[in-house]
Each structure stands twice: as structure tokens, then as C-alpha cells.
Image: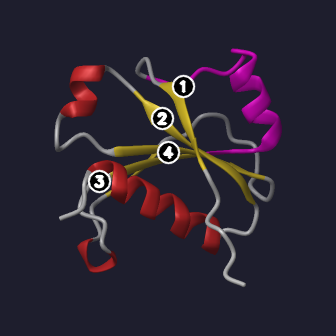
Amino acid sequence: MATKVEEMRKLASAHYRVEKGITHIFHITGDVEEEARAEEPIKLLEVNRYTIPTGIMPLSFGPAPAHGIHYPSIIVEVTPDEFQRIKRRELRLPNGWTLGDLLPKPRRKS
């Protein structure tokens, strides 16, 4: 089975391919001890220019082993403006979460 980090990258790549409005996807990190637990979900913040502004609304999903995702996930989708407000700390992620690394878009096949 792939590691949680490998599956996080796979999930982000799939979301970039499916959701054309996504401009950036970031790993959301929490408490170090919690993140190390196998049952802790993969958490992603997705900046989507086609979504509507709703604030910070984490959506939880179960594992999807048929698609190669064996961990639960939490997705937070925000508009570009909401993302700027997160960066300015006007909007806060819940549960002490912070923005982690940017997960790059998959390269286009030429």
C-alpha cells in the first residue's frame, strides 16, 4: 500500500485533472502527533476559481480503495479571495490546522 504522502499527491493530482477551476492545492497540517497516526485523514485546501464563497467548510470523505486511496480525506475548497484572506489571517482554518506544502499540478503529457 502507498504511504499517506503518496496517496495525498495522487489525490491532489486527480483533483487538478477533474476540477479545471483549481489553481492551487495545499496540504493542510495539524498537530504533529495526530498527523503521524494512520487513521488521521489526508487534509487538502483547494483554491478553486469556479467555487462560491462559503468560508471554511471542511468536507470529509471516506477511503476510496477502488481508486487507490486507502485513507480518509478532508477537503477545504475556497475561492481565490478566500485564500488571500487565509494568508492574511482574516479567515482561519479550524482545529489549529495550518497551510503546508503546495502540491504541484501534474505535468501535461506532450
The quarter of the picture where the N terminus appears is bottom left
Q: Is residue 85 magenta?
A: yes
Q: Which mark is residue 28?
A: 2
Q: How many angstroms separate mark 3 from mark 1 (CA)?
A: 19 Å
* Image marks 1 and 2: residues in contact by CB distance under 8 Å: yes
Mark 4 or mark 1, earlier in chain:
4
What residue range appears in magenta?
Answer: 77-94
Question: Residue at coordinates 73% horizontally, 34% vertically from top-left?
Answer: 83
Q: How many angstroms separate mark 1 from mark 2 (CA)?
A: 9 Å
Crowding at mark 2 (Cα within 10 Å: few <14, some 14-19, many 20+): many
* Image marks 2 and 4: residues in contact by CB distance under 8 Å: yes
Tell me the kind of residue under disc 3.
Pro
Helix, strand or loop status at disc 2:
strand
Crowding at mark 1 (Cα within 10 Å: few <14, some 14-19, many 20+): some
* Image marks 4 and 3: residues in contact by CB distance under 8 Å: no
Which residue is tagged 1? 93
Helix, strand or loop status at disc 4:
strand
What x and y, as percent, mark residue 96?
43, 17
Residue 19 vertical position relative to residue 98 in the rendered view, above or below: below
The outermost residue toward the bottom is 110
Mark 4 or mark 3, earlier in chain:
4
Which residue is tagged 4? 44
